[in-house]
Amino acid sequence: MRRWRAAHPDEHKAARDGWDRAHPESSNARRKRYAQRHLEVRRLIDHTRRARHARAEGHYTAAEWRDLVVKYEGRCAYWNGEGPVHEGPLQMDHRIPLPRGGSNSIANILPACGRCNRRKHLLTEEEFRARLAAERAADRPGTDGQDVHGTPWYRFPPDW
Ligand SMILES: [Zn+2]
């Protein structure tokens, strides 16, 4: 049979195609095998990429991320409790961005809404919080030097 196939490749192909048409489950099976091989290659590439990422920058698990989201009650870590809750699905924000030397361990991760995550971009958590505070202060003309309830600033201790 093998010798006949080698000697008559076209006939073999025609016979196989005809057989496949008559038996679609067989070509499905072949397609499945092909997809399976591709999936294995895909997995290997993913694994290599993940391993490189983990080696370079630390690692956190899906469970650790879930616990963090629960700790923040499913809310953006940059929402200060005033005004409308930051909308949208939570994303993993790096408190210190990776390009600025931050790690990829859970201690360096915060849940953030898409808008905050995009706006923060390469800022550190500290820098971004300072920017948000400055924006809030600018949004409240007339409260400069006073707290939100109108208490004059001089009632605060001098080192406040
Ligand atoms: Zn937010």
Image: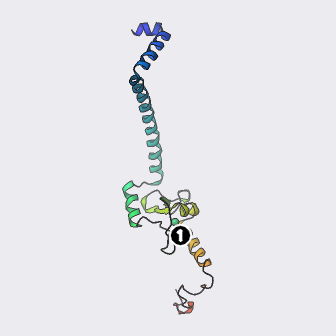
**Which of the image's four quarters has the N terminus?**
top left
Q: Residue at x 43, y 62 (%)?
A: 107
* Percent x, y of residue 74: 42, 64
Q: Residue furthest front?
A: 22
Residue 105 lies in quadrant: bottom left
Q: Which residue is mark 1?
A: 126
Q: Residue at x 45, y 15 (%)?
A: 18
For this view, does 10 lie left or right of residue 142?
left
Residue nearest the viewer, comparing 117 with 84:
84
| Label 1: element kind | helix
Residue 19 lies in quadrant: top left
Q: Residue at x 55, y 89 (%)?
A: 150
Asked if residue 23 is positioned above or below residue 150 in the image, the reply reads above
Residue nearest the viewer, comparing 39 with 61:
39
Residue 65 lies in quadrant: bottom left
* Percent x, y of residue 24: 41, 23
What crowding class fits label 1: few (fewer than 14 Cα within 10 Å), some (14-19), or many (20 or more)? few
For this view, does 3 lie left or right of residue 141?
left
* Percent x, y of residue 93: 50, 60
Q: Amino acid at mark 1?
A: Glu
